[in-house]
């Protein structure tokens, strides 16, 4: 039975009403409102026939799993996250989880409760990292890319430790790695998400197949010049650290525009002494570069370093770099990307567009393990997310549910044929 898009929309509105306020969604992970969202979600399962043997459990890292056992333990997992940022939107994460459950229910009905493969829905814990600054908490515990030592020292704005917040939700920080047990028998993972950017809207397209998540190079760059009196220092005698940084801020735009999907951002600039009467002696800035192609990412990083040295020289300054964080590009599986394109094409009746994701998603942690993975994006109005005005046209949401349902069916067929071969 095909998934019912209107039921998905009604459920999302219901969830928004009970876990949001005038400022938007308030489902911050490990808070009572987030737990309330999960209890609401569990309640949806009780509406299904008991004969389906659907079970629900929370793993060692707080990820919530719903399982419809099939003839084979090999499983298709559909998921996303119910947590939100403070004052967030109604669709970010929730769309994927609520749609996943609708698709699972349709498969249960189609196969009278016993599909050929096991179907699971996962609601990842703390995808947003809004409270403790660590995104993809639950999915990275699942993937084994977390660090308990780093997690142990995290605190929120009120000084509450992550460890205490987890304990309040019956999660032991020392055991979160046990979430890796959930990997067993997973054959494929699919995630539907809003795009959170303007690309699909600009192309006039409701849906897109996601090719992977972009790699990130994130660095702190410090230019050192000479503090000097702004009145007495002739222009030719200055060693202005801000001038060098400013030239780099413009140059990274040129570097990025050589590649169609690349982005480069200087998001923070601090000047010292930072007073109106002094030439800037030291300028600390940050650089964030992203692309899906590792060669392009490495090239942009090298070009930015070379440019920074050139501008430092020209301004008679010096420059030093230190890496803040980086992650390699994570491409999704070609076979599933193709199925996603097919599902979109059949739903829209027009050729499907594919695009990389700039933001990281739980799907990236799953794909890093080598699990066959892809995502589908639905257009975001104005490209806005992490904001109460985040929205998507209802007709686009309906198309997304239908296309994602098709993708799940196609993936089951692919699992069948890959088992047979
Ligand atoms: Zn999200």
Image (cartoon, rainbow, N blue to C red):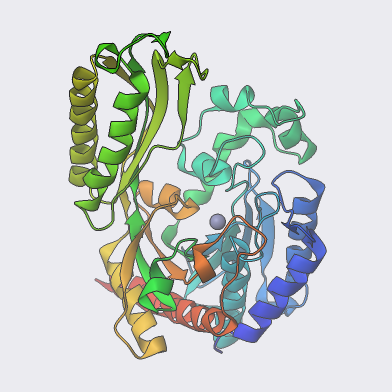
Pick the front one: 188 or 125: 125
Residue at 42% from the left image edge and 22% from the top image edge: 284
> Which residue appears at 46% of the width and 43% of the height?
143
Q: Residue 219, image x and y in percent?
A: 36, 29
Residue 232 appears in which quarter of the rendering? top left
Relative to 107, say whether 308 is above or below.
Answer: above
- State left or right for residue 238 relative to residue 188: left
Where residue 87 appears, as percent x and y from the top left, is: 70, 53
Asked which quadrant contains residue 56, the reply is bottom right
Looking at the picture, tell me which residue is in the foreground, 400 or 319: 319
- The N terminus lies in quadrant: bottom right
Q: Please provide percent x and percent y for residue 305.
A: 23, 28
Question: Which image quadrant shows ligand 1?
Answer: bottom right
User: Is the C terminus in the top left, top right, bottom left or bottom right quadrant?
Assistant: bottom left
Residue at the image position 50 percent from the left and 41 percent from the top: 140
Coordinates of residue 133 in the picture (x, y in percent): 59, 35
Q: Does 197 sit above or below residue 322?
A: below
As drawn, 369 above or below 230: below
Q: What is the tally of numbered marks visible in this picture?
A: 0
Which one is in front, 306 or 26? 306
Camera sees residue 87: yes
Q: Nearer the viewer, residue 104 or 399?
A: 399
Task: Classify residue 384 as left or right of residue 39.
Answer: left
- Residue 222 in sight: no
Q: Residue at x 60, y 55 (%)?
A: 386
């Amino acid at each position: 039975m095909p998934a019912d898009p209107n039921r998905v929309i009604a459920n999302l509105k219901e969830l928004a009403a009970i876990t949001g306020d005038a400022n938007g969604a308030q489902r911050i992970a490990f808070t009572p409102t987030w737990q309330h969202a999960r209890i609401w979600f569990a309640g949806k399962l009780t509406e299904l026939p008991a004969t389906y043997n659907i079970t629900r459990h929370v793993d060692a890292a707080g990820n919530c799993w719903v399982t419809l056992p099939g003839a084979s333990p090999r499983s298709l997992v559909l998921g996303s996250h119910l947590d939100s940022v403070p004052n967030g939107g109604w669709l970010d994460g929730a769309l994927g989880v609520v749609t996943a459950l609708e698709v699972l229910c349709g498969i249960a009905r189609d196969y009278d409760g016993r599909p050929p493969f096991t179907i699971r829905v996962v609601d990842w814990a703390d995808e947003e990292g809004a409270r403790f600054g660590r995104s993809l908490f639950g999915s990275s515990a699942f993937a084994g890319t977390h660090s308990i030592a780093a997690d142990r020292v995290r605190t929120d704005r009120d000084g509450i430790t992550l460890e205490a917040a987890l304990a309040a939700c019956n999660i032991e920080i020392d055991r979160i790695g046990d979430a890796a047990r959930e990997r067993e028998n997973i054959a494929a993972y699919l995630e539907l998400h809003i795009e959170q950017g303007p690309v699909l809207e600009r192309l006039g397209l409701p849906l897109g197949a996601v090719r992977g998540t972009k790699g990130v190079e994130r660095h702190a760059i410090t230019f050192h010049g000479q503090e000097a009196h702004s009145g007495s220092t002739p222009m030719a005698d200055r060693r202005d650290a801000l001038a060098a940084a400013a030239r780099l801020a413009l140059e990274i735009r040129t570097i990025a525009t050589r590649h169609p999907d690349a982005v480069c951002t200087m998001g923070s600039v601090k000047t010292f002494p930072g007073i109106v009467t002094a030439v800037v002696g030291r300028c600390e800035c940050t650089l964030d570069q992203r692309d899906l192609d590792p060669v392009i990412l490495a090239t942009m990083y090298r070009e930015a370093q070379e440019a920074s040295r050139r501008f430092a020289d020209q301004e008679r300054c010096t420059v030093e770099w230190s890496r803040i964080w980086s992650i390699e590009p994570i491409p999704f599986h070609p076979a599933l990307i193709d199925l996603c394109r097919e599902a979109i094409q059949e739903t829209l009746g027009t050729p499907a567009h594919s695009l990389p994701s700039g933001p990281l998603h739980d799907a990236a942690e799953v794909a890093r393990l080598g699990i066959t993975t892809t995502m589908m994006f639905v257009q975001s109005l104005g490209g806005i997310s992490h904001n109460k005005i985040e929205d998507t046209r209802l007709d686009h949401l309906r198309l997304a549910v239908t296309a994602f349902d098709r993708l799940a069916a196609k993936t089951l067929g692919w699992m069948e044929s890959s088992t047979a071969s």
